[in-house]
Image (cartoon, grey):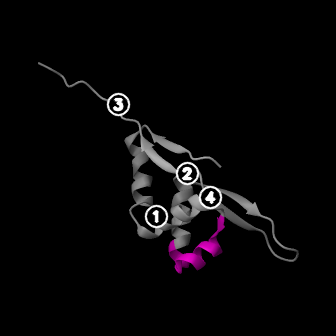
Amino acid sequence: MGKRTRIINDPSDLVPLLLAFGSEVHKRVFEELCEDWRTEAELSELMSDERGVHRSLELLKKSGLVETKWKMPKPGESPEKEYHSSYSTPGSRRTSYAPWRI
């Protein structure tokens, strides 16, 4: 997938981003998901923090920053969800307002 940038038009869209990138665990999970598709188990193994990874994935899903797909299992195994980042970088659209002059 090519690199995509999420444009933020409304200040309320910043809140989930501030939550997502205000934690080292959330940032590391997002960076791993930018590289490749990963399951929650793979991320937990890489981060050594199963609970933190689960919270990060929930937050990133609610923020619309990750997408999911089902991983095809080997015969006899259960399918697992894989996660990948939807965007490579967040950005903002700035609008300049002329100050009122009296």
Q: Secondary structure at mark 2?
A: loop
| Residue 48 is covered by the magenta coloring | yes
Q: Residue at x 46, y 48 (%)?
A: 90
Q: Secondary structure at mark 4?
A: strand
Q: CA distance from mark 2 to mark 3?
A: 24 Å
Residue 39 figure quarter:
bottom right
Residue 40 location (% of width, % of height):
63, 71
Residue 87 location (% of width, % of height):
55, 49
Residue 11 location (% of width, % of height):
37, 42
Mark identifier at residue 64: 2
Q: Earlier in the sequence, mark 2 or mark 3?
A: 2
Residue type at numbered disc 3 = Thr
Q: Is residue 16 left or right of residue 81?
A: left
Q: Which residue is mark 4?
A: 84
Q: Residue at x 88, y 74 (%)?
A: 75
Q: CA distance from mark 1 to mark 3?
A: 28 Å
Residue 14 location (% of width, % of height):
40, 48
Mark identifier at residue 95: 3
Q: Judge the density around disc 3: few (<14), some (14-19), many (≥20) Cα neighbours within 10 Å.
A: few
Q: CA distance from mark 3 to mark 4?
A: 31 Å
Vertical comparison of 60 with 10: above or below: below
Q: Judge the density around disc 2: few (<14), some (14-19), many (≥20) Cα neighbours within 10 Å.
A: some
Residue type at numbered disc 2 = Gly
Magenta stretch in the rendered image? 38-52
In this rendering, which labeled residue sits more in front, label 2 or label 1? 1
Residue type at numbered disc 4 = His
Q: Judge the density around disc 4: few (<14), some (14-19), many (≥20) Cα neighbours within 10 Å.
A: many
Residue type at numbered disc 1 = Lys
Q: Which residue is mark 1?
A: 27
Q: CA distance from mark 4 to mark 2?
A: 11 Å
Mark identifier at residue 4: none
